[in-house]
Image: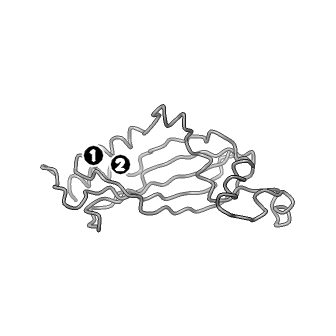
Amino acid sequence: MSELLTTLRAFEGQTLTPTTWGPDEVNTPMIRHWVETMGDTSPIYLDDEAARATGRDGAVAPALMTQVWTMRTFTDKMANNDPSQVWTDLIATLDAAGFTSVVATDSDFEFFTELRPGDRVSLTEVIESISEEKRTGLGAGHFVTTLKTYRNGAGEVVATQRWRTLRFRPKGTAQPKGT
């Protein structure tokens, strides 16, 4: 194993985002915006009676909104309240080796529990794996997979999300000396 890969693999299992609670509870106005934008006409998202008719306790949020409830606010982004030191160190390591470009490659969700208005959602994210160097159409690089775990206020896992990006050295870019 190369020295770089050994260094990169040391990041596996480290926490990128410690448990962070979303700024708002799951709420009907945001659900309404989502379903109208997405064109989702299922009545279980906005109508308690329709949801009860399917065996639920009341209206539920669309599963794919899980990530929405933990997104940072505009104020947080403008205050530059990220990233974590682990993320900063990982990116610096990749940048120093010439892997300065990034593209998201895929995102896989698995859902376990439906969310209802009033629920709070937290997010914890860890680095799950970093691949050996791969040759791609964009250039050589490493796939970085993180695992996001979403929990409700009772601590139950609501969903998990594997988020994979490719950190790559664009074709035609010279490899830094010493790597």
Does dot 1 land on a helix, a strand or a loop?
helix
Q: Are marks 1 and 2 in contact (CB under 8 Å)?
A: yes
Expressed as whole percent of the image width and height from the top left, the position of residue 22 reads 61, 42
- Viewer-nearest residue: 61 or 78: 78
The residue drawn where x is 48% and y is 31% is: 79
**Mark sitting on residue 80:** none
Expressed as whole percent of the image width and height from the top left, the position of residue 105 reads 41, 62
Residue matched to label 2: 11
Q: Residues within 10 Å of mark 1 (few under 14, many from 20)?
A: some
- Viewer-nearest residue: 20 or 72: 72
Q: Nearer the viewer, mark 1 or mark 2?
A: 1
Q: CA distance from mark 1 to mark 2?
A: 10 Å
- Mark closer to the chain start, 1 or 2: 2
Residue matched to label 1: 93
**Relative to residue 3, is residue 137 depicted above or below?**
below
The residue drawn where x is 58% and y is 52% is: 67
- Viewer-nearest residue: 19 or 62: 62
**Relative to residue 89, is residue 110 depicted above or below?**
below
Judging from the image, the colouring scheme is one colour
Expressed as whole percent of the image width and height from the top left, the position of residue 65 reads 63, 55
Quadrant of the image containing the N terminus: bottom left
From the viewer's perspective, is 1 left or right of 159?
Answer: left
Amino acid type at image mark 2: Phe
Does dot 2 land on a helix, a strand or a loop?
loop
Expressed as whole percent of the image width and height from the top left, the position of residue 51 reads 81, 61
Point out the residue furthest to the left here. 177
From the viewer's perspective, is 4 left or right of 43?
Answer: left
Amino acid type at image mark 1: Thr
